[in-house]
Amino acid sequence: ILNVEQSPQSLHVQEGDSTNFTCSFPSSNFYALHWYRWETAKSPEALFVMTLNGDEKKKGRISATLNTKEGYSYLYIKGSQPEDSATYLCAFIGSSGGGADGLTFGKGTHLIIQP
Amino acid sequence: DTEVTQTPKHLVMGMTNKKSLKCEQHMGHRAMYWYKQKAKKPPELMFVYSYEKLSINESVPSRFSPECPNSSLLNLHLHALQPEDSALYLCASSPRGVSYNEQFFGPGTRLTVL
C-alpha cells in the first residue's frame, strides 16, 4: 500500500492571503504526480501533471513545485479568492514494473477561503 | 465535447439486484478508469482500460465487472453488492494509457446498496 499524505487536512484562510500545502509520497519508483481541485458537487479538475524533479508549474495564482528525491510537492495559492475554496488532491503514479501504475490519491486538503 | 458523462447520477439497489453504471467520453481518449470514493476518503482506483483492454484491476471483488465495448464507452456491471459498497463511483479518461496525461473526471454516480 502506497503512502501518499497531504497536510494539513483542512485550512481556513482569509481572502487575499496566500497559502500553501504539502503532498508527500514515496521517493522511489516515481513516475508522475498529479494535482486536482475538487469543488463540492462538481467533478475533480486537473491542475498540474508534474514529472521531473525540480519542476515548477503555474496556472494563474496557483503554482506547484516537485521534489522527487525527497518525495514531496507543494501547492501554492497567491491572493486567495472565495472561488479557491475546494478540496485539493494530489495523486502519485509509481512505476513498479517498468510502465506506469495507477494513481494513488492522498486524502486531500480542504481549503476554505473566508471573505 | 470536452466532458465525461456518467449515468445514472443516483442509484439505489438491493443486494440481489443487477445494475450497470455507464460512462461516456467523446474526446478520443484511449484510457478510461473507474474509481470508488467513500465519504471523507480519497478516490480509490478500481480498474483501468487502455486501448479497450483491461490493464489494471486493483484486486476488486468479482461482484464488480467492468466492460469497455468501444473506446468511448465504459460500463461497470454490479451484481450481489453489499451495503459497504455504497459510495460515489467516479469515471475518468485520459488521452493515452496511465502516463503523464491528466485525467478528466465525470461527476460520478452515487450508489446506495440496501
Image (tube, coloured by chain):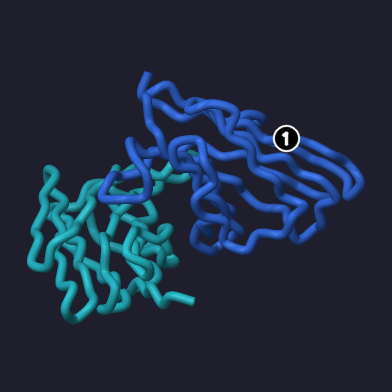
Chain colours: A cyan, B blue
Q: Is residue B17 left or right of residue B5?
A: right
Foreground of the two, A49 or A101: A101
Q: Is residue B85 left or right of residue A10?
A: right
x%, y% of residue A3? 41, 77
x%, y% of residue A10? 38, 67
In percent of the image, x 37 and y 18: which residue is there?
Answer: B1
Foreground of the two, B1 or A115: B1
Foreground of the two, A69 or A86: A69
Q: Disc 1 marks which amino acid?
A: Ser
Q: Is residue B81 left or right of residue B25?
A: right
Q: Secondary structure at mark 1?
A: strand
In percent of the image, x 72 and y 40: which residue is there?
Answer: B77
- The outermost residue toward the bottom is A70
Residue B61 appears in which quarter of the rendering?
A: bottom right
In percent of the image, x 16 and y 78: which residue is there?
Answer: A69
x%, y% of residue B83? 81, 57
Residue A32 appears in which quarter of the rendering?
A: bottom left
x%, y% of residue A112? 35, 57
In percent of the image, x 91 and y 46: which residue is there?
Answer: B16
For the residue carrying disc 1, how many other residues have a C-alpha within 10 Å: few (<14), some (14-19), or many (20+)?
some
- The outermost residue toward the right is B16
Residue B102 appears in which quarter of the rendering?
A: top left
Residue at label 1? B20
Q: B63 above or below B90?
A: below
Q: Is residue B79 visible?
A: yes
Q: Is residue B114 visible?
A: no
